[in-house]
Image: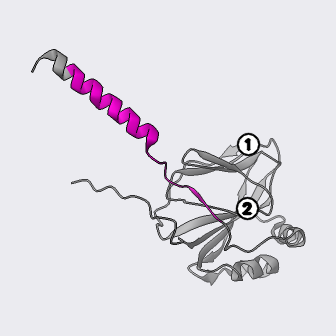
Amino acid sequence: MSAVVIIAIVVLFLVATFILLIFLPKPKCFYSTDKLPKISEQLLTDLKKDVAGVTSSVVLYNGVVNEDCNFMPTLYEQLLQIEDLSYAALEVIEPLTDTPKMTSTKTDALCAVLPIKISGAGRSGVWCDGDNKLFKEGQWFLFDHTRPYMYHNKHKNKKTTMLLVHVKRPADAAPPLKFVVT
């Protein structure tokens, strides 16, 4: 083959690859929170009282409630309202912190986050596979934690407290792609 044909094939390959990368749909990271309990202002106030002074802790694992949850009655009642709950934990993000990027291997679940006390509007949130969602107190959001993700808190001196729960992956949330090397 002549050099011109080889160069033409390489250029065509590069153009085709570029077009595919631009126009292929990006995997969905965030999902509807319709099935999660609604959080009223009073409930949010009660949850803040429950978690005041709490450091990060696992509240529920494989359907079994941690004994330490007894001092958080409002939180416990809310956890009982969530269908197909397998894991729940309180997480505190320290000021000026970006957690390391993480990826879960738990493909049968999605991660729901309820920011209970945020450091400030627009200061803390979650980054998931290129999308950034900022926390709003008392507003759930649901994301696919099998995609690369990390939490962040950009406030200089205030912490962010959130409840993380793993719920069963809904039917409209396709499981992540698995690549097999042969």
In which quadrant of the rendered view does residue 139 lie?
A: bottom right
Q: Residue at x 90, y 72 (%)?
A: 42
Instruction: Give the image location of residue 165, x and y in percent.
Output: 64, 69
Looking at the image, the residue that sits furthest to the left is 1
Q: Residue at x 28, y 28 (%)?
A: 12
Q: Main secondary structure of the magenta part?
A: helix
Give me the C-alpha separation between circle 1 and circle 2.
Answer: 16 Å
The relative height of residue 149 versus residue 19 in the rendered view (above or below) is below
Q: Is residue 62 left or right of residue 79?
A: left
**Residue designated by label 2:** 162
Q: Say whether residue 25 is magenta.
A: yes
Q: Say whether residue 11 is magenta.
A: yes
Instruction: Give the image location of residue 155, x and y in percent.
Output: 79, 43
Q: Decide which of 41, 31 is in the foreground and name it.
A: 31
Residue 146, disc: none
Instruction: Give the image location of residue 59, x and y in percent.
Output: 67, 74
User: Is disc 2 placed on a helix, strand or loop?
Assistant: strand
The kind of residue tagged 1 is Leu
**Residue designated by label 1:** 96
Q: Residue at x 74, y 53 (%)?
A: 135
The kind of residue tagged 2 is Met
The relative height of residue 89 versus residue 180 in the rendered view (above or below) is below
Q: Which residues are magenta?
A: 7-32
Q: Residue at x 77, y 76 (%)?
A: 75
Q: Dot 1, crowdedness within 10 Å: few (<14), some or many (≥20)? A: some
- Split into 4 quadrants, where in the image is the N terminus? top left
Among the two numbered marks 1 and 2 on one chain, the one whose residue lies closer to the N terminus: 1
The relative height of residue 149 versus residue 63 in the rendered view (above or below) is above
Q: Between tags 1 and 2, which lies in front? A: 2
Q: Dot 2, crowdedness within 10 Å: few (<14), some or many (≥20)? A: many
